[in-house]
Image (cartoon, helix red, strand yellow):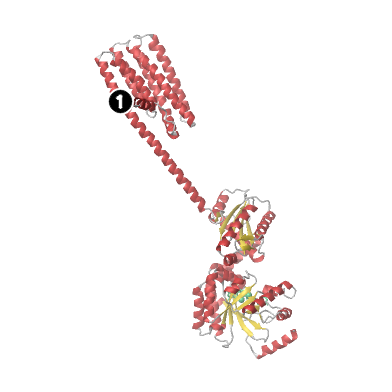
Amino acid sequence: MRIRGFFRQVADIFRVQEDQPDLIRAQVNALSRQIPLMYFLLTANALALSYTHYGAASDTMTIVIPAILSAVFFCRAIVWIKAGDKVDDLAADLMQLRRIRLVALIISVISSVWAVNLFSYGNPYQQGHVAYSMSITVVGCILCMLHFPPAAFIVVGVVLGSFVVHFGLSGNDVFVAIAANMALVSVVIVQIIRSYYAAFSELIASRRVLEEQHRTTQELSNQNRQLAHRDFLTGLANRRDFFHRLETMLAGADDTTRFAVAVIDLDGFKPVNDVHGHMVGDDVLVQAGQRLVTLSGGTSYFARLGGDEFGLIVDHYGNEADLTLLGQALCDVMKVPFETAGGPVHLSCSVGFATYPAVARTPTGLFERADFALYHAKKNNPGSPVLFAARHESLIRQESGIEQALRSADLDAELSLNFQPIFNLLDGTVLVNEALARWHSPVLGRVAPDVFFPLAEKTGQIGDLTRVLFEKLLVAMATWPDVERAAFNLSAQDITSLDRTQWLLERIHDHGLAPRRITFEITETALLRDFDAARQSIETLRQSGARVALDDFGIGYSSLRLVHELEFDSLKIDRSFTAPIARNPRSQRIVKTVFDMCDTMGIRCVVEGVETAEQRDILMQFGCRYAQGYFFAHPAVQPVFDNLTTLSSWRSNIAHGL
Ligand code: C2E
Ligand code: CA
Ligand code: CA
């Protein structure tokens, strides 16, 4: 067993290790640089020996054999130089190593036989040269093949073996000493080769580990980069990726580049979250994302920009009509009800487009213009696409002019209040005077509240406006008869800030007014901005005795949950339902339904925007009690109070009308 084990160990020494491809590659690499040098050394040493022995030995020994050997060495060197360290596959590398082993064996045997034979021809000097030449050749070859021990060991075994045997048996003390010396040196050399090779393979192995670690780190950082650019919920690209992509597209744009950016916003999504909860809301967003991708057949780039807003980059389209068609298709696909755990959800979407290079040449420029077009779609044609056009550009400029004027405005001097009464249709008394803001800018002249309030919300100036206007109302009310009431409009920011609510109540208190004399009007859309904060504000206001009205009912989400969960004192049906009421049975039915609902819930119902006697009469027939509109009174600097003249003219009006 031991003997077999020993032979196996010996055989292992000469075996090519096949299981480590990178080690094999590194070996072939190192050898390809060193082996040509080795052949140079062998050629030089063979020529030197043949030179010193020329004449002493036969021509075959000193000319023919060295010439053949040199030619072989030269050819092999050329082959190696030509091969360089080009990357072959593993099989080719293995073949190469096996070939080196074989060539090393053949050359060692031939060279040793030749050298040992030469030895017998020469004088002691020449014999010394042979001994010297064999030893340094062996050491040189081993150094050149340090990276491939099987070949190095073959050289040591064959050359030194024959050397030691031959010299050891020569009977000459000097040569015996040299042989013993060489045997010792061989042992040391073998040991050095082994430890060098162990260090070399360890180095290669640790390099492999490092490379693997590097690869893993690289993969992780790729994954991280991917995650940083993905929207977690929908799996689409996220806002960051959207802008990154726009930047890349613009950086690579030339004269022929044309593409369009679209911003898509779901209409009616917010109440889905409020009514059905966030799980259903998330589900709808995921489905919406899938619909977008499916619609484009997976070819267009979609991103979720945040909330219920999506972005799209269209880089192949013919003309603007194509974009409108695409936008319409997007809107249509969103109109199909979403099946959710909370039941079917009905939504629509609006789309704004901006084209490159016609509309803007920067990512933010394109996005802002697409967003502006979206804002117009939502305002004027919800559920449809709008392409940013030249007229929008002038609107943007106009708006930014208004924003600037508002920023530098002396609010106290430029803002004022008009009052418009809400009447009790049955007896002609004034229920309340609604305070309506007026802004007269020295730069722009009169600016409509519909225009400047949304801008003030956008720029964050709304708080200042509310404070100035409310203060003006309180000052005005100090001069009113004690029984007269006012209504004051609050913006979304006012109603979602508890500080602002507290401030309003403090000011009422400081002016010594009874809170019940003031009704705060709040729109549905304002409530939906932050439902819980709005609920808290409404409760605080009502607890103080102030009243709260739901304004513009019917044009927002008209969610019953709002009316059900929040306690309102009154509800104002939006004026858009009043205008067609004489002709449109649908409007009539809606208004009637709201009246009934208010009756059931015990809250007052006010109809806005009554402009004609006909509208008033129809409304009265439906049981309408409170109304406001140009027919009764336009907003005016002076509020309208009950007095005998107004009441008697009222009665005659009613008698005449009915
Ligand atoms: P709103 O609260 O719905 O106010 C009623 C608007 O309808 C007023 O427009 C009023 O002039 C107009 N109106 C009244 N009767 C009729 C009518 O018979 N027909 C028509 N077509 N319109 C009528 P105004 O004063 O331009 O105000 C527009 C909006 O600006 C208001 O709508 C309100 O949302 C906002 N607003 C006005 N003043 C304030 C304020 O002090 N604070 C806040 N946050 N918003 C205000
Ligand atoms: Ca109002
Ligand atoms: Ca209103």
Farthest residue to the bottom: give it. 644
Tell me if mark 1 has few (under 14), some (14-19) or many (20+) residues whose alpha carbon lies within 10 angstroms of its own. few
Against 35, is 203 above or below?
Answer: below
Q: Secondary structure at mark 1?
A: helix
- Residue 432: % across, % down: 61, 83
- Residue 456: % across, % down: 56, 70
Kindly identify which residue carries mark 1.
Answer: 187
Q: Nearer the viewer, residue 462 or 502?
A: 502
Q: How many marks?
A: 1
Q: Quadrant of the C terminus?
A: bottom right
Q: Nearer the viewer, residue 37 or 618?
A: 618
Q: Name the image quarter holding residue 182.
A: top left
Residue at (35, 9) in percent of width and height: 57
Against 469, is 428 above or below?
Answer: below
Looking at the rendered structure, the kind of residue marked 1 is: Val
Residue 447 visible from this viewpoint: no
Q: Quadrant of the N terminus?
A: top left
Q: Position of 118 compared to 454: left or right? A: left
